[in-house]
């Protein structure tokens, strides 16, 4: 075990602490830069390509239309015959 003076050990500890602070600060700057780049590349308001309109497939639309027509939901329902009063 070496017998260093307390002031020498203190100076070594301060240098080590200064290097650790510098490493933490540099790591924070690098992490911030990476997160900034990733967020800008994936942000929704910056589309990378033209937006496609949302629509149901044509075959699905045809099937739904035919089912609705068969059920009579598109055409108005036929009214029952009007009530007639008996003559006296």
Image: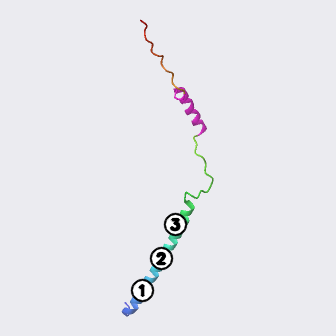
Tell which of 23 and 60 is nearer to you: 60
Residue count near mark 1 (Cα–Cα under 10 Å), binned few <14, some 14–19, many ≥20 = few
For residue 35, the mark is 3
- Predominant secondary structure, magenta span: helix
Q: Residue at x 52, y 72 (%)?
A: 30
Say which element carries label 3.
Answer: helix
Up the image or down, 44 lies above or below 13; here it is above
> Is tag 2's residue or tag 1's residue first in the polypeptide sequence?
1
Residue 30 on the magenta span: no
Task: Work out how far the residue at label 1 is from the one at label 3, CA to CA, in angstroms.
Answer: 31 Å
Say which residue appears at 55% left-offset and 33% top-offset: 64
Q: Residue furthest front?
A: 88
Question: How many numbered tags mark residues here?
Answer: 3
- Mark 2 Cα-neighbour bin, 10 Å: few <14, some 14–19, many ≥20: few
Q: Which mark is residue 25?
A: 2
80 to the left or right of 5: right
The N terminus is located in which quarter?
bottom left
- Name the spot of residue 71 as percent of width and height, x first: 51, 27
Q: Earlier in the sequence, mark 3 or mark 2?
A: 2
Nearest-to-viewer mark from 2 and 1: 2
Residue 85 percent location from the top left of the image: 43, 11
Give yes or no for residue 59 being in the magenta stretch: yes
Identify the residue at image location x=51%, y=24%.
77
Q: Give the residues in magenta.
A: 57-74
Residue hosting label 1: 14
């Amino acid at each position: 075990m070496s017998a260093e003076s307390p002031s020498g050990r203190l100076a070594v500890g301060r240098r080590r602490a200064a290097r650790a602070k510098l490493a933490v600060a540099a790591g924070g700057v690098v992490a911030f830069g990476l997160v900034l780049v990733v967020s800008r590349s994936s942000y929704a308001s910056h589309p990378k390509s033209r937006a496609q309109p949302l629509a149901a497939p044509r075959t699905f639309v045809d099937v739904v239309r035919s089912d609705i027509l068969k059920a009579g939901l598109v055409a108005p329902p036929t009214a029952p015959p009007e009530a007639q009063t008996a003559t006296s």
